[in-house]
Amino acid sequence: MEIEYIGHSACALSADGGVILVDPFISGNPSADYDWKNRNVKSIFLTHGHSDHLGDAIEISKTKNARITAVFELANYCAKNGALANGVNIGGKISFPWGDAWFVPARHSSSTPDGVYAGEAAGIVFSIGGVKFYHAGDTSLTQEMRLIKEVYKPKAAMLPIGGYFTMGVDEAVIAAQLLGVEKVIPIHYNTFPPIKADVEKFKYKLETVGIEVVIMKPGEKIEL
Ligand code: NI
Ligand code: MN
């Protein structure tokens, strides 16, 4: 599985001869420079409805004919706004020709930029080519991470470390250990002043317990 980091919590997974976008916050994202118009966007996933995750999803869906998969209330909101959307919920496994995705619990809130209730916030576990990757979305440190390890055994995770709206560096260090992952890609930090975080401290702390930390710059790719 190849992952391109777009910036903030947004990434593009290579699959199905194209890309699967997760939380495509691109316009208005000071850390993103991703030309989605020139990509073969096959599918879009949203962890929750906040503007820094919903991002450009509706416009991308309309332009690229790409279906959004999101929690039921958020999917309905996207559909009402003209997108193609598939409503799912926490605990569900959704199968595609390219692999599977499971919506898993996140401890966070979820509403759309115009204040509409958007259901529960989620994390998403992807299985592509036999590799499992967990995108935590926005969440606090939670006991659910023990179960995510036990049930899905993800190889790698994207974890928020910015604090303020999500867990911070110290909690994310514990999260990575609960998840039992080999590799962590820190996300959701330094995009805006309240979520400034010491990513080098995060890397140091996890590497002392044998978990690799890959600090990705927007536009960089990693093969899992
Ligand atoms: Ni959020
Ligand atoms: Mn966020």
Image (cartoon, rainbow, N blue to C red):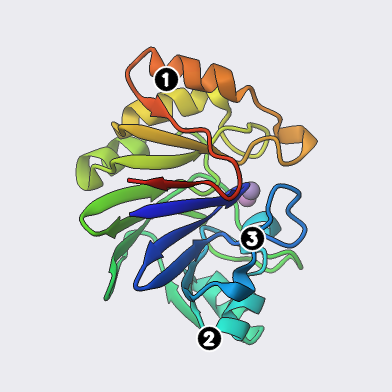
Indicate which disc residue 192 carries.
none
Instruction: Report the residue at 71% width, 41% height from top.
Output: 191
Q: Nearer the viewer, mark 3 or mark 2?
A: 3
- The residue at which mark 1 appears reads as 206
Estimate the x, y position of residue 132 in percent, counting from the top left: 28, 50
- The residue at which mark 2 appears reads as 65
Residue 35 in the figure: left or right of residue 20: right
Which quadrant holds the N terminus? bottom left
Give how far apart the Cα atoms at labels 3 and 2 are. 18 Å
Residue 126, placed above or below residue 84: above
| Tag 3: amino acid | Tyr
Estimate the x, y position of residue 96 in percent, counting from the top left: 29, 74
| Depth order, front residue of 65/77 | 65
- Answer yes or no: do the residues labelled 3 and 1 have beta carbons within 8 Å? no
Asked where in the image residue 113 lies, by quadrant, the reply is: bottom right
- The residue at which mark 3 appears reads as 34
Does dot 1 land on a helix, a strand or a loop?
helix
Estimate the x, y position of residue 107 in percent, counting from the top left: 50, 44
Mark 2 Cβ and ligand 2 under 8 Å apart: no
Residue 199 in the figure: left or right of residue 152: right
